Every structure is written in C-alpha cells, then in structure tokens.
Image: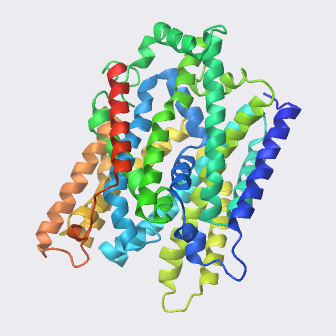
Amino acid sequence: MNLATLDVVVVAAYCIGLVTIASLVSREKKGHEKDSQDYFLAGRSLPWWAIGASLIAANISAEQIIGMTGSGYAIGLAIASYEWTAAIALLVIGKYFVPIYLEKNIYTMPEFLEKRYDHRVRILLAFFWVGVYIFVNLTSVLYLGALTIEIVAGVDMLYGMLFLAALSLAYSLYGGLKAVAFTDIIQVAILIVGGIAVTFLSLDKLSEGAGVIAGFTYLLDNAPQKFDMILASDHPSYMDLPGISVLVGGLWIAQFSYWGFNQYITQRALAAKNLREAQKGIALAAFLKLFMPFIVVIPGIAAFLLAPNLDVSDKAYPELMKLLPAGLFGLTFAALIAAIVSSLSSMTNSISTIFTMDIYRSTFQHVAVSEKGLVRMGRCAALVSLIIAMLVARPLLGNLDQAFQYIQEFTGFFSPGILVIFLFGLFWGKATAHSALAAAIVSVVVSLAFKLWLTQVPFLDRMGLAFLVSAIAAIAITLYEHKGDHPKAVRLEDFNFKTSAGFNISSLAVVLILVAFYSAWW
C-alpha cells in the first residue's frame, strides 16, 4: 500500500497536533518546578475521563489490533473473551484493589510489596518488571509496530522503529505521565474513529451498499461458525481458547495480573485526583472494553467472507484498509500509529518510574536525592530503555514466526506467581515475605515444567494449574512459619469498600451486557 498525499497530510497533522498538545498540558505554573509526583503520577491530578481513556490507550497497540482482527478471521468472536472478561476484572480491581493502593500512597507496585512484605520482594519484582518491560513488552510493541507500518505503508522497519521511538519521546519525555494520559484521550478517539470506519465499510461492502445492519445480518447468516463464543474440543483453535474454561479458568489469571498489578496500567489509577475519580475512570475503561471487539474482531470476521483465501490471517486488517478512501485511510493509519506510540510512551514512563523510585532511589537512600534529580533520572531511564529496545528488537524477535503468541506465553510463566503474591498480600494477613518469594519461583518452575511435559494441556489451563500450585506453596510456607498476622499486613477492616451508586449501576450494566452477548452467541 502507498499513502496518498491527503493521507500523508492527515498523518502529519496528527503527529504535529499530538506533540503540540502534549507540550501545552506539560507546562507548569510559573515558579513551579516539576517534581517526582508531577512527572511520574501527573501530580495525582488525573480526572476520570483521562484515566479511562489512558487505560485503553496503554492496553491497545497496533499488533493487538491486527492480531485480534486476524484472530477474528481465523477463529471468530470467541477471541472477544479477552476483551469482555477484562471488563469484569477492571470492575473488581476498581472496587477492591484501588482503594488499598491509594490509601498506601504509593508510586509503584514494587513499592506496595515493600510496604506489605519487605525490601527483598520489592527489589526482586522491580528488576523483574524493568527487564520484562524492556526486553519483552517495549521491544515487542516497537518491533511489531514497525512491522505493521511496513505492511500497511511500505516504510522500512528501521525507519519505522526510529519514527515511533522519536514520536513517543517527543511528546512524553518532558511531560511524563500527565502528557501521556491527556494525549491518550486523542489517541483513543482516533483509534475508535478509525476502527469504526473499517467496521462500517467492511459490513457495507458485504451488503453491497445496503448498509451496516444488512451487512451484519449477512455476516450472521453466512458465517455462523464464527460466532461461537465457547469452542468445542475438536475446534482447531481449542488449545488457544479451551472451551468453557476460558470463562472459569486461566484467563482470569492473566486478566487480574495484567489489569491489577501491571505498573503501566495501574499507574493511571495511582495518579487519580481521588478514589472516586479512579473508580469512574475504571468504569469507563470497562465500557470501552465491551466495545472494542466490534472494531477489531467483527472486521476480521467480515474479512473471512470478503477475502477468504488469505494465506496469513493477520493480513486481514491491512486487506480491509484497502476499502478506505484517501484521507480516511490516513486517519486509520494514524489510529495505528496512535495505538503504538501510546503503548510505547506508557511503557517507557512506567520503566522510568520503577527504575527511579524502586531501584535508583532505594539504592541511594543514604544520599539526599533531590526531586529534580529524580525527574532527570526518570527521563534518562525512559530514553535508555527505548534505545535498548531498538537495539535488541530484531535479534530477539526477527526469527520468530509468532512473536506475539510467544511473548504472551513467556509472560504467562510469571503471571500466576505475581497474582498469588498480590492477592495474598492484599487479602491474607498471614502471608510472609518468604511465601511471596516462593510463589514467584514456583510459578516459573511449574509453568516451565507444564510447557515441557503437559503440551497437550491448553496454555490457559496450564496457567490456572500453575496458579494453584504457587498458591499452595505460599500457603504451606506461611503455615510452616506460623508467625500469625504479618506486622505489615493490610488491615481490611480499616477500608470502606463501598462504592458510589454510579459505579454500582455501571457495574450492573456491564454484567447485563455481557450476559446478553454470551447468551446470544453461546
């Protein structure tokens, strides 16, 4: 594909507008110097609408858009369970996790672990997350994002990576989380508009100009197998989405680990003006998760009928973009760029936060480190992390046929243990630091053993089993130590988990909508 002149103008306008707005929102009042709270947590001033939009922008990247559209092409609507179960996880996290995080007044998730367990747990998880964010998450978004741009626009991958990294740094390096969060509103708006355009045009094409409703009806009538939400055991994709256990098994491990304890996600809630704003923002994100399959999965199912002979399912989205006229193609291409750079900026900001607050500051705690020094170190960490990611991207991912799936499985080695550490830390007063360390180690060992010797068991089910084994190990060590309640235990009786009427109504609406979806396409 080649960008028309109008498309280039649209993309250029998007990039210029993004950097301009980021610069404006990053300005400090005269006489005020940006401190660590301003840089890493936006001065704890984020309103609900910025939190909700930023949660989605941080989550969705270009390879996920193309990957989920490809999964819609190959599997069907069943892949939407990843989005829809996330909505439930978000609401639970907003009600029960976020109140504790905000009361603890933390910057990072490793900091919570020190306040609940000890410094060893904090520093271990800090180094782990920095390593994973740089060598797995940041590298994958940068590499696969550049690959996406190469497929869609024909831009060489090297130049694509340099462009993405430069754009991400241009609007986020100075302003920190505030610049990221407020520009994410624009990113999500462009993402949704571009996604709707692809969905509408593909459905209209199916109906031969009769409209979207007619196109969707045609889709239901001519590809009913693509609307099975629960896959049978003989389905070719059963190993990826193992039937009913998707709703009751390992997928919840991934959801709660990702949305509840992942720094570049939780950082938005930590930066909220107050608890109510954080919960309203999380409710908004939950509603947006319900909507996402209709702009990333439904087009993939439409492509199954429009272009049934694609050799690779991930070519479905680029194929559908051919339907877009000049200008609208540029807007949709800008939406892909928006998805990439918002994820990049979120990850680099979280890397800099963890490195600065959990590793750098704790290492030099005997030295008086100024607020200006912390901000400077955060900017350096963000810059260096992107440089490292660009250098190692091709060597790490260039020879993998299914890089995204490989990365998901790699992070799945650690997710069960991390979930055990945080769940027990939040809700079981007796859990000890040794049990937390054991859960982390057991999770990796058991996950690796399952991968090597239980290859016939679906990946999500293996995650569920690894979680159970890690939990049992943590419980056994805690009971063996029999020290009673940990001195740093979270005292749940001190918290009021009562939520506002608006949050409760939103939660009920999300649940009812999901019941309707699964009832319609069981």
**Image quadrant containing the N terminus:** top right
Name of the residue lying farthest toward the right: 5
**Nearer to me, 465 or 333:** 333
Q: What number of labels is visible?
A: 0
Classify 354 as above or below 414.
Answer: below
Quadrant where the C terminus is found in the figure: top left
Residue 163 appears in the rendering:
yes
Compared across the picture, whether 19 is left or right of 43 comes to: right
Residue plotted at (78% across, 47% down)? 159
Identify the residue shown where x is 55% and y is 30%: 296
Residue drawn at (47%, 62%) of the image = 129
What is the residue that sits farthest to the bottom in this orientation?
Answer: 367
Residue 171 left/right relative to 226:
right
Which one is in front, 148 or 388?
148
Relative vertical location of residue 103 with respect to residue 363 in this rendering, above or below: above
* Res. 31 image quadrant: bottom right
Task: Let me know if residue 262 appears in the view.
Answer: no
Q: How does the figure colour the protein chain or chains?
A: rainbow
| Residue depicted at 73% across the width and 24% down the height | 324
Q: Is residue 71 above or below residue 352?
A: above
Q: Nearer the viewer, residue 66 or 192?
A: 192
- Residue 398 rendering spot, x and y as whole percentages: 63, 43
The image quarter containing residue 78 is top left
Residue 371 image position (x, y, % from top left): 59, 83
Where is residue 2 drawn, in percent x and y? 82, 29
- Residue 171 shown left or right of residue 507 in the figure: right
